[in-house]
Structures are given as structure tokens and as C-alpha cells.
Image: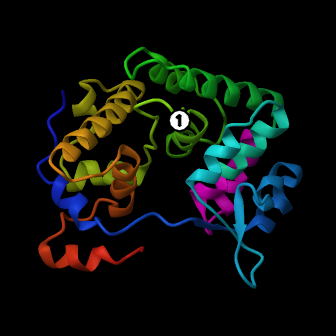
Amino acid sequence: MTARPAGLEVLVNAYRTACQQPVEIHPANWESALADYAILLRDNRYTSEIARSSHRLIGRDGLRRACGSISSPLLSCQALVLVMAWGSGRIDSRTIRHTGWALAKAEDAHRMLVRSAEQLKSAATLRDGSLEQAYRAWRLPGIRRSFFTKWFAFAGYTAERSWQPLILDDRVLRTLNKTLNIGTQTLAGSRLWSRRYVAYVEALHQWSAELSEDRVIVDASQLEWILFRHNGAALPTTETARATEDLDC
């Protein structure tokens, strides 16, 4: 069991009325670079229109639906583009370039995407080796931890399971390291990133359960988002917490 950081409840309470909004994406930017791979960005099953704009909105539910149907090479690559677009939002030029590198060999990309999704969905427990193996096996050029764990979170989602893979990007790490003074190396007792990822996912689910027992209701994905949103800033005081409450909702 990993001891809960002393400041975590303060941080969660600071964001207690905030929530993650759908991300605005620019389909035309992706279409001009990746052609057919970007077709799902305008699919009403996964994204929604913005009034009087060519831009679209996409949220986590749409990503889970898209990543749940990756039966062909084309569909798996299109689902990856959705995840990458969501992850980069309006600042997408670099991510588009990196996604192009990853999809240069579509069959290889499809095998990697399907293999990781199947491995994560079939995981019986956090410690059965599946998460660590999926992390170690990831090989797509241009897509590093901050983005391939986004793929893990959506393509590896299993609705009936009590835990899910989570996103571990640089903003989350900054909050763990700078705000809460606990690193993934400490959580894992190892310098190996594959083990650090597993320990991070396990810790967030554990902390979420403990906070809920203390009547601070937050699930692990919300906790992940709070760490992302805070981005390593100082631990909120009472005054800054009040200012934070109305940021999103």
C-alpha cells in the first residue's frame, strides 16, 4: 500500500466543482496531413459540432466508443488519430507530424494498437503483468509516454472492471513531483518506467478509494485529470482554492 500524499485531499477539494470539458479540435489540420486517417474527427458518433465553426468537440466518452471498435487496420489508425487530436487540442502541428511518423507503416501500427488494447482489456488485475508488458512492448515512432498512455486509457477501457489504465503525461508528473512531493520512482521502488506506470495507476485507484471512504468522492480518472490540470503548481491555499472552483463548470 502506498501512503496517500498529505496534500492530495487539499488539491482535490480545490477542484471539487471543476470538471473536464470536451476538447476543441481542428479537423482540417489533420485532414490536410493524414487524409483518410482523420475521417472520424467529423463523425457525429464521436465528436460534436461547434456552432458557426468548422472546429469540433470531443470528450472522453467519444474516445472510448471509437477505441472500442478497432477491428481493421484503418479503424485502429483512425481511432489513434482521434486520441492524438484530443490530446493536443488546438496546438496540434507537432502532434500531427508525430502521428504521421507512427502511421507511416499502417499494418505495423495496427498490430501494435490492437495488441496493446487486447492486452490491457484482458488484464485481470493491476499486478498480473499486463500493464507492465504493454508499456514495455510499445513501439510506435513519434508517440511517447504522454500520448501512448492516452491510447492505453481509452483503448484499454473495460466497463465492468473496478480499475482502468490511466494517462501519465508530463503535467501529471509535475504535480506528483512538485506539488505532492512524491515521484513514480518512489511509488514503484524502481527506476523502470514500465513498473513506475503500474505503480502510478495502482496508487491513483488506491487513493481514490481512500478519499471516497473519507467522503471526498473522486474516481481515479478524475484524480488523474486534477493532477493534469494543476500542472505542478504550488499546493492551493484557501484563497486559491476558491478561485479554482469555478474554472470549468
Residue 183 versus residue 235 in the image, above or below: above
Q: Main secondary structure of the magenta part?
A: helix
Color scheme of the displayed model: rainbow
Residue 172 x %, y %: 37, 51
Name the residue nearer the viewer: 29 or 153. 153
Quarter residue 31 falls in = bottom right
Name the residue nearer the viewer: 137 or 85. 85
Residue at coordinates 31% horizontally, 40% vertically from top-left? 204
Name the residue nearer the viewer: 72 or 148. 72
For the N terminus, the image quarter is top left
Q: Amino acid at mark 1?
A: Ala
Residue at coordinates 79% horizontally, 30% vertically from top-left? 71
Residue at coordinates 19% horizontally, 40% vertically from top-left? 210
Q: In the orientation shown, which residue stands out farthest toward the bottom?
A: 52
Name the residue nearer the viewer: 214 or 196. 214
Q: Which residue is mark 1?
A: 159
Q: In the orientation shown, which residue stands out farthest toward the top?
A: 128
Q: Is residue 101 magenta?
A: yes
Q: In the orientation shown, which residue stands out farthest toward the right?
A: 36
Residue span colored magenta: 84-103
Residue 120 versus residue 61 in the image, above or below: above
Residue 109 is left or right of residue 244, and the answer is right
For the C terminus, the image quarter is bottom left
